[in-house]
Image: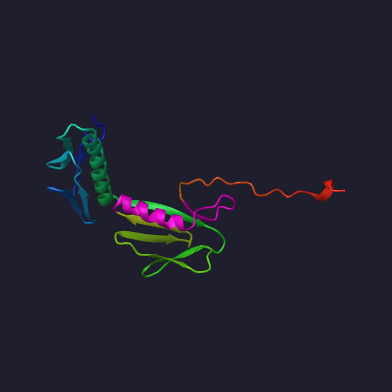
Amino acid sequence: MSKIGKQIIEIPNGITASVTDFDIVLKSAAGEAKVKILDGVRPVLSGSSLSFETFRNSQQARSNWGTLKALTANAVIGLTKGFEKTLILEGVGFRIMEDGDGLTLHIGFSHPVLYPKTPGISFEIEKNSILKIKGTDKALVGKVAAEIRAMKKAEPYKGKGFRYSDEVVRRKAGKKSTTSASAS
């Protein structure tokens, strides 16, 4: 039995849910989310609660049961509260600027790096070095944050580059200088 799959999702006020043959459609003032129904699982909508049941007795169907519940719960959270990832840019001369088309990143290369605007994602910049990525789709927010971080990961010697706000960058000691006193 799936401990996650058998939990019931309560649909809050302001969100309308409908189940089609292939999708679960959730709509609110923040937008719309569609969750594809996975194989072997049937969503049951009754009033303002959504539950899931399996109709096949296979390992894949039981796995899909919990996965579909988690994806639907994330869609509900995204439409009510939204998701946010925070990236911090460290380094002398490194900065983030918002363009009309997306972001312009000055991250130590000979040229500025342009990151295009992604539909469903909004950027908020603080102090030219803190980037907040916000959206209603959890997977899309994480993907955009990972793509931006991959452009310049925090290096272990000085910590220059992008890091998540809750990430700890382990620092390494640099080279030790040797004294020439031992040479006679």
* Residue 113: quarter of image: bottom left
Q: Residue 75, percent across and down? A: 25, 48
Q: Residue 83, percent across and down? A: 33, 51
The residue at the point 55 percent across, 64 percent down is 93
The residue at the point 12 percent across, 47 percent down is 21
Q: Is residue 149 shown in magenta? A: yes
| Figure disc tally | 0
* Residue 98: quarter of image: bottom left
The residue at the point 40 percent across, 56 percent down is 147
Q: Foreground residue, 2 or 123?
A: 2
Q: Residue furthest right?
A: 184
Q: Is residue 128 above or below residue 137?
A: below
Q: Residue 136, percent across and down? A: 29, 53
Q: Foreground residue, 49 or 6?
A: 6
Residue interval drawn in magenta: 136-163
* Residue 42: quarter of image: top left
Q: Is residue 137 shown in magenta? A: yes
Q: Is residue 124 above or below residue 173?
A: below
Q: Residue 74, percent across and down? A: 27, 46
